[in-house]
Structures are given as C-alpha cells and as structure tokens.
C-alpha cells in the first residue's frame, strides 16, 4: 500500500534496536555498524539513539532483566533493594553469571495496582515480599517467564467512575459514518464548536489544530496519536487503548478525513508493549471492516492507514516535537518552534499530534454531536476528563468527571482521608495543599493531563519532591543548558537537604535556580520541571524549614564521603582512614 | 508586495528602547548583530543554522523569555536584552556550563581565546558558584592533527553544524541523554582518526572552547596578548558577523 512507511523491508530504527536488545540483551558496537548499514543511516545517528533511550544498553543485561518502577504511586524502591539482596546483585549491574540485572525506571503506568515492575518488558503488578521470594526462586532455577504464574502478569483496568464518555456505547464505524454523512468541512466545524481541547494537558483547541493542519500545504499530511503516556501517575490511556482502541483509531481516521492525511501513527510508549498485539488486531479488524485502508466505507479517495511505532523509555518523547523526532528515527530532542507541527511536523509535513483521550473524544463527538459534549463541563472546559487516581486512597483507578468538579469531591469518591497534598497533573503539574481542595478541575483552574496523585498526612512530602527532582534530572534530553545542568543542580541541592545538610542558604539558591530553569528552558519539560519544588517551597515552607540546619552555610562537599574511593582502593576502613 | 512602502518604512523591532530594522526571515539575533547590537551567545555563529541550546541569548519579550537566535523577528516586538536581571541569568547559565564540565583555564591552550571564558569575564563571573560535577569524559587523540577533549565541551554543536553545512561532511553529532550527553564522532570506530575530518575543516577550527584543538600548536601567543585579552567578546562577536574560522595567532 502506498501509505506504508515502515515495513519488514524497511523497519523502524527503534524496532530494529529493540529486537536486538531483546535477543542479545544488549546492543554491541558491531550491531550499531550493521544497523547503520542496513537502514542506510549515519553511524552516529544509530549510536546517539542507542544512548538516548533508557531501554537500550551497551553492555549485556541479565537473562532476567528487572526494572522496578520508582514512581511515588506504582514504585517501591525498598522492594528493589530486597530483590537485590535475594539474588545477590547490585543495582544497575548485571550479575557475574549473567542471570539477572535489576534497576529502577520511571513510572510504568501501573499506579492503580502497584508496586510494579517490568521483567524483560512484561508488566508485573501488586508486588510484595512474598511474591519477590517466589520470583527469586524461579529466576535462580532459570524458569522461563512463560512458566511463571500468569496471574502475576495481570494488568487490571480499574474503571471506578464512568461519565460522559465511558457511559456511552460506541459501535465500530459510528464516528466515521457520521463524518462521511456530514462531510469534512462540517465535521471540522463540529469539532471546533464542541469546544474540545487537548487532553494531554496543554489544552489547545483540537478543532483549530486540525484546521491549521488542513490549511497547511504539504506533499502529505500526518496524524499522530500520542500514546507515550509517561507523566508519572497517569494510566488512563493504557485503559483506553486496551478497552476502547477502536474509537481512538476512529478518531485518528476522522482526523485524517478532515485534514486530508492518509497516514497515521500510534506512538506507543515502550512500557506498554503488552498492548501492542491487541492494538494490531484492532487495526486489522478495522481494515477488514473497511474502516481503514483504501476507499474507507466505499468512499473513493478516502484512504487512511495507521502504523504503530514503539518508544523505548524516554519521557521527553511525550512532547510532540520530540515524539516526531523519535518517529523520524532520531533522539527525542524537542524542535525549535516555530514552525509548529501543524505546519512542519513529521518529515517536515503538516502533522496533527493528539492525545489518546482527545482522539477518542473527537470520535464520540462526531458520532453523537457537539451539543452532547459541550453541554457538559464548564464554559472554558467543555466535556469530561479521565483522571488516573492513585496514591493514598482506598480505590485507585480511572475516574471520569465533567470539568468543574472539585478536588475534594474526587477525594471523597476514591476514599482518601487525612490528605496532606495532591499532585495534580503529575510532577510537571501542580502540587496543591488542603486549602486548595475546593478548587475545580478545568483548563482555566486546575489543569491536568490526567494524573492525580494523593499523599496522606503520614507521607514525607519532601521525599516526594526529591523523587520528582530525580525524575526530571534523569529524563531531560540534555539539549539546553538551563534544563540539562539545572535539573541536576536542583536534584543535588534537594538531596543535600534530605540528607540533613541543608541550610537557609541552600533554599535561597534552590529558589533562584528553580525560577531560572522554569523561565529559560527550551521546552515544556524544563519549563515545568521545577514546579514541584516551587510549589513545595510556597505551600509547605514549614516542612522544609524543619529539615534545615540552624546555621548560615554548610558545604555541599563531604570530605569523608569523598575518601570512600581511596578507602576502597587501599582496602582500608579503620578509624584512621576516616576523618 | 508594495516595495515602495517597504523601503520608506522598514520593519523594526525594539531592543532595549532602540529601533532595529529587520528583513523577513531574520531572527532577533540576526537583526541585532546586523545593527551592531550585541546579544550574548555561545552556540550561535552567523552563517550556520541556529541551534538555540546554550540559552545565553535568552531575552524577554512581553514577559516571556525567548531565545534571540531562533525567534523570528516580528514587527513591533518590544525586547529587553541588556538588563541587570538578564545579565544575572546569563551569568548563572555560564556558571552552569563551567561546573558541568572539567574546565582547566589556567592550563588550557585555549585560555584567552576561549569564548566561554570571555563570556565569564563579560558577565562579571568570579567563580563557578555551583558544586563542580567532575564528570568522566573521554579524550580522543587518535587523529593525526586534531585532538578532541570532551572534558571541555559545552555541547554547543557548532562543530556538528560546521561539518554538515560548510565542510559537506558529517563528522560530529551529539549523543546520549541529559547530563550524559556528549559529542560523538561519526566513524566506524567512533574515533576521530577514523573519520574524514581534515585539519583545515571549519569543524576542526570552530570550537569556542578548548574541546577541539589543532595539534602541533601551543602557547605560541603569550597570555595577555590573546584574543580576549585585548578585546571583549562583544567586540569580537560583532566583528564576526560573517562566518570565519577562529583566528590562530600564530598564523
């Protein structure tokens, strides 16, 4: 088919590297040369991609490669340490016999059923010490994953509250048929007048985005579904892609119809590999039913098809221009804007990048009408929002509300009490204190891509902020100075306070640098990375002051700790080897 | 298009209260440099495509910050550039660049000819301020006439662009992620000696710091008589509006 971009003959770089990583447990220098030759790409491009994505390794990982989530909702680092002890392995290093390797990874989107990990890419949920002991025994016996209890790999979809979208039924073809009946112009008008705004968090008008793309000239137009759901605490797209993939695909197809695009991509985060097979089946079913392919539903000239491209562990690829770079087989470095993707996106052509939930909403609006949608929500935020509720509550899961619902209402629904704080919108969003729990959900009030992480009074909130500081220092792309260096300086400064060495001077320094990183960074990652720190300083100052030394200054340099390497080299640990 | 009208009233942007003319397609940086107005920058070089990564050229526009080297000039823009706040921000960014690498100014051959060092002087930087990172980075001495010392690299990608856009080669790239980013060489062994870099390529001579140095030359001009000992980076950069190789004093 003419729209095919990647195929067996010309596979996508990330897929080729992923195959090698899975087969050989690492990507050797020879592999880089071979892949460059095979795909006719510069060697440096292949190497930079290998080194950019967290799921690719230059030295062998274990036969069993365990990645524990370090998210505050679906992670438990103490379990990782337990597992390291059980198997006699150091974090990050492969055991000498090559059997096992263990390390942590950013949120894997299982926050409603954590603690969780990925073993050789397969998700395991609801971990506890007993489970770890059983796993350790099986690993020691080299028991293949296929022979492990399948219940360990169960990923549940905990839909706790259905609203506008999830209460509706949607039969395959409903959206596309309605679009064809109405024509492309009216379908676009309908999306615009529905008031639908991007569900990824930024909230740009979906209809206007489609309109700009449609108007932009190019050899081809593209529709991209951003399924790189990487914001810690978010997992609603995981549910949508496993239970409502058809409507999401239809949303893409309608976007193609409106903009004249013939090709679409679902960019699926590598952590969601287990969704890929079912997604492909749904795509095939759509092709069989004439909902994808040449002449969709018999309409001559309406050609559209979709390919799935899998990411490989990079939060930054959720940023739309980084995603496009990744799709173009490069490192996920955000582009210079303008031009915006609607004018110059994938391969320099007009491109729409929409969130999973946005595309699903567009399909429903097309099928059911704009009034059905816009009579819900608030004036500036039409419709409903899916929330991924996690953390300290009785019923974590997916909750759908009309915009305008208060934070307290959500807390009551999910069974959260004595709440100290909520991180709304994930680490890049807003940390709110109980005084703000009457605030409402909406682009004009509290915006969120869906993450809703709850922290009980008993939680060490500074540790949460520290976790987020580490997250951004790990996930930033390295392109611009303020974010590349600043996020690490901030991380180290927070670490210093947590370790009991912080003073008021350090707090002033953190504040000054956090503001600089927020204002001067290149893209949304850097511009939001300091949010948890700034919110914490503003809203919970006492929690920080309590942890400070009562003196003007304490050096960040710990002389005794710095001698550790010398002690190791000289095999000494006696009193004389310490200060 | 009404050329008469364009000629009679050229389009302008306003930088620090001064009207600066610009033509379509120019960035804020292009217009400023052409008018003899200095906006600090390290990763930018007229003649190469802009990169926008060092963020030294951050300026304020309607309360938000933009990078002058990548933001297209638009009629009526009111831009703040030389303000105490912005100079403080730029000093901090320069300090960040210093502490993330291993800069050895007193013994570096590039001292006095180094843009990073000159930027530090220009902005009144007296120390690195932040704790040093002391990264471990590789030195590549495999090339017969060029040495690559990544300790001093500031990821400006001038060499990357010079090689692709001027030399017609593709010798360098930025690889890795975050703080692990590093300059890599596009050759089978990953070594410079295995690449097609030639000593007189622009890419071998454009490094603003001491990361890429020509072998066989060293300390021929005494400290005190080097580029930035006699001129500030403002004067140097304004004199360098068109692309040319970094001057070698011994030539």
Image (cartoon, coloured by chain):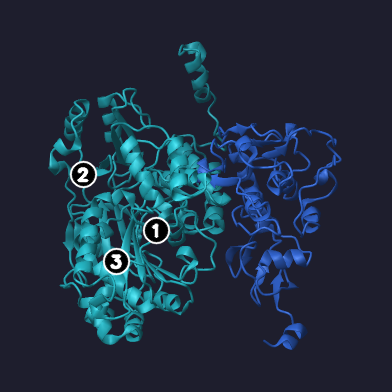
Chain colours: A cyan, B blue
Using a 10 Å C-alpha cutoff, classify the residue at mark 1 as few (fewer than 14 neighbours), some (14 to 19) or many (20 or more): many
Looking at the rendered structure, which numbered label has been put on residue A357?
A: 3
Residue at figure coordinates x 68%, y 47% from the top left: B203
Q: CB atoms at circles 2 and 3 under 8 Å apart?
A: no
Quarter of the image for residue B9 reads bottom right
- Name the N-terminal-most of marks 2 and 3: 2
Q: CB atoms at circles 1 and 3 under 8 Å apart?
A: no
Respond whether the residues carrying marks 1 and 3 are from the same subunit. Answer: yes
Where does the image place residue A96, in percent across and percent down from the top left? 34, 23
Q: Is residue A226 above or below residue A365?
A: above
Q: Is residue B191 above or below residue A365?
A: above
Dot 1 falls on which chain?
A
Where does the image place residue A399, in percent across and percent down from the top left? 22, 62
Looking at the rendered structure, the secondary structure element under dot 2 is: loop
Looking at the rendered structure, the secondary structure element under dot 1 is: strand
Looking at the picture, tell me which residue is in the foreground, B81 or A60: A60
Q: Visible in this render: residue A375?
A: no
């Amino acid at each position: 088919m003419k729209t095919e971009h990647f195929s067996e003959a010309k596979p996508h770089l990330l897929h080729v590297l992923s195959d090698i990583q899975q087969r050989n447990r690492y990507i050797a220098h020879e592999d880089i040369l071979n892949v460059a030759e095979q795909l006719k790409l510069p060697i440096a491009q292949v190497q930079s991609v290998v080194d950019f994505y967290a799921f690719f390794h230059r030295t062998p990982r274990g036969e069993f490669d365990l990645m524990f989530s370090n998210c505050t909702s679906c992670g438990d680092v103490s379990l990782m340490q337990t597992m390291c002890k059980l198997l006699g392995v150091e974090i990050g290093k492969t055991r000498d016999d090559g059997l096992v390797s263990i390390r942590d990874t950013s949120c894997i989107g299982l926050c409603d059923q954590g603690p969780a990990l990925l073993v050789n890419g397969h998700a395991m949920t609801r971990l506890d010490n007993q489970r770890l002991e059983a796993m350790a025994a099986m690993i020691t016996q080299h028991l293949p994953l296929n022979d492990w209890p399948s219940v360990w790999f169960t990923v549940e979809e905990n839909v706790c509250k259905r609203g506008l979208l999830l209460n509706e039924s949607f039969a395959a073809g409903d959206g596309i048929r309605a679009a064809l009946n109405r024509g492309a112009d009216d379908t676009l008008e309908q999306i615009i007048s529905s008031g639908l705004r991007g569900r990824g968090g930024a909230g740009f008008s979906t209809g206007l985005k489609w309109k700009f793309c449609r108007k932009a000239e190019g050899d081809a137009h593209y529709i991209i579904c951003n399924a790189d759901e990487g914001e810690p605490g978010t997992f609603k797209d995981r549910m949508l892609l496993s239970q409502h993939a058809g409507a999401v695909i239809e949303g893409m197809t309608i976007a193609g119809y409106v903009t004249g695009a013939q090709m679409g991509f679902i960019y699926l985060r590598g952590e969601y590999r287990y969704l890929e097979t079912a997604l492909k089946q749904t795509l095939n079913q759509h092709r069989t039913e004439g909902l994808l392919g040449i002449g969709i539903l018999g309409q001559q000239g309406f050609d559209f098809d979709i390919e799935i491209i899998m990411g490989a562990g990079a939060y930054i690829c959720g940023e739309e221009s980084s995603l496009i770079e990744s799709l173009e087989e490069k490192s996920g470095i955000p582009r210079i804007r303008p031009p915006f993707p609607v004018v110059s996106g994938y391969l320099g052509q007009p491109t729409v990048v929409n969130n999973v939930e946005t595309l699903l909403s567009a399909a429903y609006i097309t099928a059911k009408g704009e009034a059905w949608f816009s009579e819900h929500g608030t004036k500036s935020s039409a419709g409903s929002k899916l929330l991924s509720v996690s953390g300290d509550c009785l019923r974590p899961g997916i909750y759908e509300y009309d915009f305008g619902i208060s934070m307290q209402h959500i807390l009551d629904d999910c069974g959260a009490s004595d709440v100290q704080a909520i991180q709304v919108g994930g680490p890049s969003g807003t940390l709110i204190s109980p005084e703000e729990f009457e605030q409402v959900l909406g682009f004009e009030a509290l915006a969120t891509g869906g993450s809703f992480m709850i922290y009980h009074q008993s939680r060490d909130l500074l540790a949460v902020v520290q976790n987020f500081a580490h997250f951004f220092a790990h996930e930033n792309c390295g392109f611009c100075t303020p974010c590349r260096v600043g996020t690490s300086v901030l991380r180290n400064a927070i670490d210093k306070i947590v370790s009991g060495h912080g003073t008021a001077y350090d707090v002033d320094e953190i504040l000054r640098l956090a503001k600089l990183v927020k204002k001067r960074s290149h893209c949304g990652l850097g511009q939001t990375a300091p949010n948890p720190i700034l919110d914490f300083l503003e809203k919970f100052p006492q929690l920080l002051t309590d942890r400070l030394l009562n003196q003007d200054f304490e050096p960040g340099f710990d002389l005794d700790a710095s001698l550790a390497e010398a002690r190791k080299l000289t095999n000494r640990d006696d009193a004389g080897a310490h200060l | 298009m009404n050329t008469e009208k364009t000629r009679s009233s050229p389009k302008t942007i306003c930088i620090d209260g001064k009207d600066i003319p610009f033509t379509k397609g120019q960035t804020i940086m292009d217009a400023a440099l052409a008018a003899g107005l200095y906006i600090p920058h390290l990763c930018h070089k007229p003649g190469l495509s802009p990169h926008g990564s060092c963020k030294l050229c951050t300026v304020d526009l309607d309360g938000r910050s933009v990078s002058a080297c990548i933001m297209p000039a638009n009629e009526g823009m009111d831009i703040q550039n030389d303000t105490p706040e912005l100079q403080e921000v730029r000093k901090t960014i320069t300090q960040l660049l210093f502490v993330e690498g291993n800069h050895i100014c007193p013994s570096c051959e590039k001292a006095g000819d180094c843009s990073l060092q000159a930027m530090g002087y220009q902005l009144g930087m007296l120390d690195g301020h932040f704790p040093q990172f002391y990264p471990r980075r590789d030195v590549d001495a495999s090339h017969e006439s060029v040495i690559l010392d990544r300790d001093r690299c500031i990821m400006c990608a001038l060499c990357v662009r010079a090689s692709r856009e001027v030399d017609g080669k593709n010798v360098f790239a930025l690889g890795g992620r975050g703080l692990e980013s590093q300059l890599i060489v596009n050759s089978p062994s990953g070594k410079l000696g295995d690449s097609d870099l030639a000593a007189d390529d622009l890419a071998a001579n454009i490094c603003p710091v001491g990361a890429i140095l020509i072998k066989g030359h060293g300390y021929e001009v005494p400290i005190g008589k080097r580029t930035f000992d006699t001129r500030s980076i403002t004067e140097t950069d304004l004199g360098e509006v068109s692309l040319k190789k970094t001057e070698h004093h011994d030539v």
